[in-house]
Amino acid sequence: MNVYGADRIRNVALVGHQGSGKTMLAESMLFAAGALQRMGTIAEGNTVSDYHPSEKEREMSVFASLLHIESNGIKINVIDTPGYPDFVGEVAASLHVVDTAIFVINAAEGVQVGTELAWRAAEDDSTPAMFVINHLDKQNTDFRSVVAQIKERFGRGATVVQLPVGGSTRSIIDVLLMKQITFDNKGKATLSEIDDAFTAEAETLHNDLIENIAENDESLMELYFEKGTLTEEEMRHGLRAAMVQRELFPIFLTSATGHVGVSRLLEVIGNVCPAPTDLPEASTVGGGSIASDAKAEPVALIYRTMAEHHVGDYSFFRVFSGTLEHGMDLVNAQTGVTERLGQLFTISGQHREPVDKMVAGDLGALVKLKNTHTNNTLHQKGSKVEMTPIEFPEPHYSIAVVSMRDGEEDKLAQGLHQLAEEDPSLSMVHDQHLSQLVLGGQGEMHLEIVKYRLKNRFGVDIEFSRPKVAYRETVQAQSRAKYRHKKQTGGAGQFADISMLIEPLEGEFVPPSDISKRGEETQETSWGSKIEFINAIVGGVIDMRRFFGAIRKGVLEASQNGPVAGYPVGDVRVVIYDGGMHAVDSNDAAFKSAARMCYRDAFRSANPVLLEPIYDVEVLVPESYTGDVMGDMNTRRARIQGIEAEGIFQKIIAQVPEAELYRYSTTLRSLTQGRGLHRSKFSHYEAMPRHVQDKVVAEAQELEEA
């Protein structure tokens, strides 16, 4: 395997909606470059990039797969990404390390939600982009309609470079070359003059392309004014520069399974798409940057880790600076641990090829590092460089997880911890109060894959169940209670007398006429609320210097399991204003018990209420599905905040109780034929309707009695 300099490397990611043909386009690219003698198919499960058993079983991409192609003296690293929205974390990681995002669009379906999702990720990383309209040979395709959708959603920078020849599924017109290209059954291209029927449209698009390129480059604008045109080389140069600035996004055509347009696409990637050296310096934490220079100190980012028994354990990386070599010692910027690099590999799916070194700009893999994980930076000893991390999406689909065999809880936790380190779009939370382990991810399919990997990699069988909702309790009115704790068992007994006022924690405390405020202390709860304690004891009826700690402890213990339904309590003010003690029998245990019981009595009389978590939800759907989605939202006690147009989609903004969001992503996909997408984020707690509270309280009582 040759070692390529950064100027002869191209890093691209195939991104887009599920079913747009990314995997088969990658397969066709390998075939066109001579890396394959025969193309595999999704149905047969023998494509290079979809090699994982879970991908073959589902006939869809689940993981981002790295491939490499050598074509015309250029090394093209291709990352084939999943299109299913549940695996958006794989897309985010891939776009962070490539230099061009190739948006693959199904010619029969047009711009879909998955395209939109990937576009946002590319925007976040300022990744240059281009479009490939695929499946030209399908029925009911409308090239011009798809182009109109692209322009409507992604702006005037979307620029047509190729158009189909009407009546033919094997010919396209390239307005950069100003040639008609016909492809045989094996993808071999033959150039000819453009058919007369398409000459006028081709010339118009050719001139539009020249003008768009010239508008973004002053020197080319001067040449254009001087000559009235630009050469092919000048156009390629200008198009690359405009792509780097994200001013232009060229549109190309392919039929991947028919080998149409693919060899030309490889040429375009090689002579138009930017090399690592064409891009601005990569940003580092702290506001610095580093150039893609093979002679500089080595810096690499681990963008993905993968550990599977059938392919091995790998750390996938991009070399951002310097040169990586086998046996080199590098330091993990996040942990400070020194790692010795094992064998370096170039990767094509599950096939690996060892190399001696890799230079700045290249993508590769090495045997998985023990103490280095996804999003970690490796650098030279003595350096302080840390690459800007990948921003992974927050989980918005949760499920409770239970091991199917007793005694495997530690094994389950270890497996989930490792999978979450490899995939930061996963989360694992153990809620001690609810006695449940909750796994968070991007959707139902995402978590099914986790279940599959736990069984096949760690030997842990799990089952999913509906997660319990973390309700909270508080009060809505002021209430008072008195409690006297008295025990006599022979010898020293127990005595504590407490008078307590509780009220909602809103604003400053306004003492009633019979209470004088003395001092206060605020205690944070485990869920982010507060319990405020006020000492209003007068005349020393209780020695608060001695017993305040015990009183506070009793209240906090009672707050862990609220009187309404056993949920944690918060946002309550507790005022100790009267009481009594005994010179011999009063002690910490007595005051702790008295405080606990007095607090519970006062709480029950203070109009207690259950609070439920409310989430901010955004739903992105094609306009035709808006009514159905809104109707479903109304059944979920949603408060619609507004509807906004976002390109060809409608964005519904709402606030929805967490209890109503269980399996929502599955319902949304059913309602919208897979074209809907949603995001959710915790907003706040608020009181639930009384009829809902009564149901939750009844369920809690049934569990307690059982």
Image (cartoon, grey):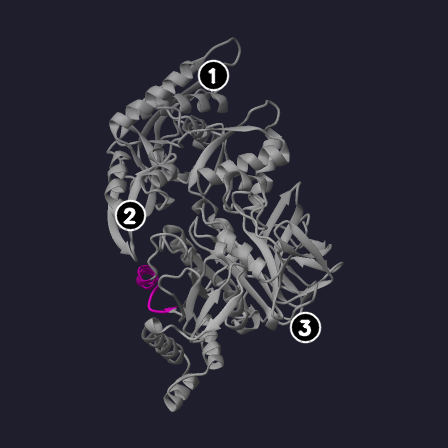
Quarter of the view holding residue 293: bottom right
Asked if labels 3 and 1 touch by Cβ distance under 8 angstroms, the answer is no
179 versus 338 height, above or below: below
Residue 41, percent across and down?
A: 54, 47
Q: Is residue 151 magenta?
A: yes
Q: Secondary structure at mark 2?
A: strand
Q: Which mark is residue 295?
A: 3
Amino acid tagged 2? Ile
Q: Main secondary structure of the magenta part?
A: helix
Tell me where the magenta segment starts and ends, as one range: 144-159
Taking the spot 26% from the left edge, 49% from the top edge, the residue there is: 623
Q: Quadrant of the C terminus?
A: top left
Residue beneath disc 2: 653
What crowding class fits label 3: few (fewer than 14 Cα within 10 Å), some (14-19), or many (20 or more)?
Answer: few
Q: Which mark is residue 25?
A: none
Camera-near label (1 vs 3) is 3
Q: Secondary structure at mark 3?
A: loop
Q: Quadrant of the N terminus?
A: bottom right
Taking the spot 48% from the left edge, 78% from the top edge, the residue there is: 237
Amino acid tagged 1? Gln
Instruction: From the viewer's side, name the closer residue of 236 and 243.
Output: 236
Mark 1 and mark 2 lie on one chain; the one further toward the N terminus is 1
Amino acid tagged 3? Lys
Q: Secondary structure at mark 1?
A: strand
Residue beneath disc 1: 494
Q: Is residue 378 magenta?
A: no
